[in-house]
Image (cartoon, grey):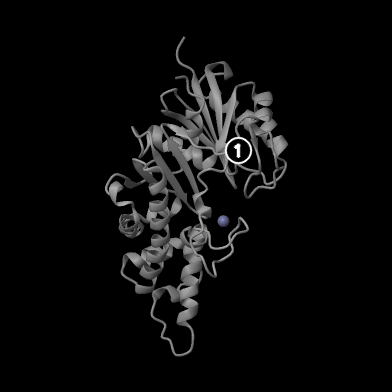
C-alpha cells in the first residue's frame, strides 16, 4: 500500500485554505473557501467535509487514502481536548471542540493547533527553517503571531498561549491600546496596523502649526503599511523614521526571546515581511545590539519562504506518518 496523503486546513478570519499533500509535504492541490463569521457548525459539519471530499476526488482518492487532517486557527488551543479556547476575529463559540466536530463529520483523525504555530511547523518542514530544530517564527500582518519550536516540537504552554510574541509589552508609557486589552504591546507598534498608526501620528505632528509638512506620507490619503515601506525604500525621512521605530521594537523583542531560547533561526513571515531588507536590516542591527554577547552571531534572522502556504503545510505536518 502506498503512503497515505495528508490534509492541511488553515482557518483564517476571512478565508479557509484546504490542501492535499503527500506524506513528504509536497502540495498536490489546494483550495480556498470563505470562512463564515457565524454558523460555524454548518461550516465544519458540511462545507469543510465537502471541500475535503472534492479535493480527494480530483485525484481519484477517498478518505481511505488520507492519514489525517491537521487544522490551524487563530486562537489558543487546549491540546488534550482539541478545543479552541477562543477563535480570534470570528464570532464562533468559545471552548469550541473543532477537533471533535471534524472527526465526526469527516471520519478521519484530526489534530489542531494555533495558526502561528502551524506556520512555524510549515517553515521548519518545508520552508526557511528546513533542517533546524530550534527556531522561532514570527508572523507579522494585521496582528503579530509567533510559534516557538524547541527540539523540533512546538511549545504550547499551560494554556496553549506560548509564542504570543505580539503581546510582549514594548511601549512602557502611554502605549496604544491593543486588541488583547493591554496597552503598548509589540503588535501596537510593529504590525501593519501599528506601522500605519505610527505613521499617522507623525503626520499629525507634522501638521501642527509651525511645523512643515516634510513627508510624502502626508500626501497619501489612506495609508497602508506597504505605502510606508515603499516611501522608506526611496528615502522618505518620515517613513524611514517610522520603519526604524517599528523595527527597533521588533529587534528588541526578538533579542529578548533569543536571550531566553537561543534559537538557531528566527523566521520573519506574514504580509509585512514582504518589505524585505527595508525592515530586516534595522531589525538585525537592533537585534545585534541587544543579544547576549556570548550568543552573538549564533541566531540567523531570515525571511519566511512559504508565504500563505505555511499554515496548511504545518497543519498537515501534524498528521504525517513518521
Ligand atoms: Zn496585546
The quadrant of the rendered image in which ligand 1 is seen is: bottom right
Residue bearing mark 1: 77
Q: Is residue 177 above or below residue 14?
A: below
Query: For the residue with label 1, is its CB less than 8 Å from the closest atom of ligand 1?
Result: no
Is 63 in front, or is 104?
104
Q: Position of residue 43 (x, y in %)?
A: 68, 36
Q: Is residue 83 visible?
A: yes
Where, quadrant-wise, is the C terminus in this rendering?
top left
Q: Position of residue 3 (x, y in %)?
A: 45, 15
Residue at the image position 53 percent from the left and 59 percent from the top: 185
290 vs 253, left or right, is: left
Q: Residues within 10 Å of mark 1 (few under 14, many from 20)?
A: many
Q: Is residue 309 visible?
A: no
Q: Position of residue 228 (x, y in %)?
A: 41, 66
Residue at the image position 63 percent from the left and 50 percent from the top: 89
Q: Quadrant of residue 44?
A: top right
Q: Position of residue 1 (x, y in %)?
A: 47, 9
Residue at the image position 49 percent from the left and 50 percent from the top: 165
Q: Is residue 196 above or below residue 58?
A: below
288 vs 243, left or right, is: left
Amino acid at each position: 500500500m502506498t503512503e497515505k496523503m495528508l490534509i492541511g486546513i488553515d482557518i483564517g478570519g476571512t478565508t479557509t485554505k484546504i490542501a492535499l499533500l503527500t506524506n513528504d509535504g509536497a502540495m498536490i492541490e489546494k483550495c480556498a473557501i470563505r470562512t463564515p463569521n457565524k454558523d460555524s457548525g454548518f461550516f465544519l459539519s458540511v462545507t469543510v467535509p465537502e471541500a475535503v471530499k472534492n479535493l480527494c476526488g480530483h485525484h481519484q482518492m477517498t478518505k481511505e487514502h488520507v492519514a489525517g487532517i491537521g487544522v490551524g486557527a487563530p486562537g489558543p488551543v487546549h491540546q488534550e481536548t482539541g478545543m479552541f479556547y477562543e477563535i480570534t476575529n470570528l464570532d464562533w463559540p468559545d471552548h469550541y471542540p473543532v477537533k471533535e466536530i471534524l472527526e465526526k463529520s469527516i471520519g478521519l483523525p484530526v489534530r489542531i493547533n494555533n495558526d502561528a504555530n502551524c506556520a512555524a511547523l510549515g517553515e521548519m518542514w518545508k520552508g526557511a527553517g528546513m533542517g533546524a530544530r530550534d527556531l522561532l517564527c514570527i508572523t507579522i500582518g494585521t496582528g503579530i503571531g509567533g510559534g516557538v519550536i524547541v527540539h523540533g516540537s512546538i511549545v504550547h504552554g499551560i494554556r496553549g498561549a506560548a509564542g504570543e510574541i505580539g503581546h510582549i509589552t514594548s511601549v512602557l508609557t502611554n502605549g496604544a491600546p491593543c486588541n488583547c486589552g493591554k496597552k503598548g504591546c509589540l503588535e501596537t507598534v510593529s504590525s501593519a496596523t501599528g506601522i500605519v498608526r505610527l505613521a499617522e501620528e507623525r503626520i499629525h505632528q507634522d501638521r501642527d502649526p509651525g511645523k512643515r509638512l516634510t513627508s510624502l506620507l502626508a500626501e497619501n490619503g489612506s495609508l497602508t503599511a506597504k505605502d510606508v515601506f515603499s516611501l522608506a525604500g526611496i528615502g522618505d525621512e518620515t517613513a524611514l523614521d517610522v520603519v526604524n521605530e517599528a523595527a527597533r521594537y521588533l529587534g528588541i523583542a526578538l533579542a529578548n526571546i533569543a536571550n531566553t531560547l537561543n534559537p538557531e533561526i528566527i523566521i520573519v513571515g506574514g504580509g509585512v515581511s514582504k518589505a524585505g531588507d527595508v525592515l530586516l536590516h534595522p531589525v538585525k542591527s537592533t537585534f545585534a545590539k541587544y543579544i547576549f554577547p556570548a550568543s552573538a552571531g549564533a541566531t540567523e534572522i531570515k525571511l519566511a519562504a512559504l508565504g500563505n502556504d505555511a499554515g496548511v503545510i504545518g497543519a498537515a505536518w501534524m498528521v504525517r506518518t513518521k
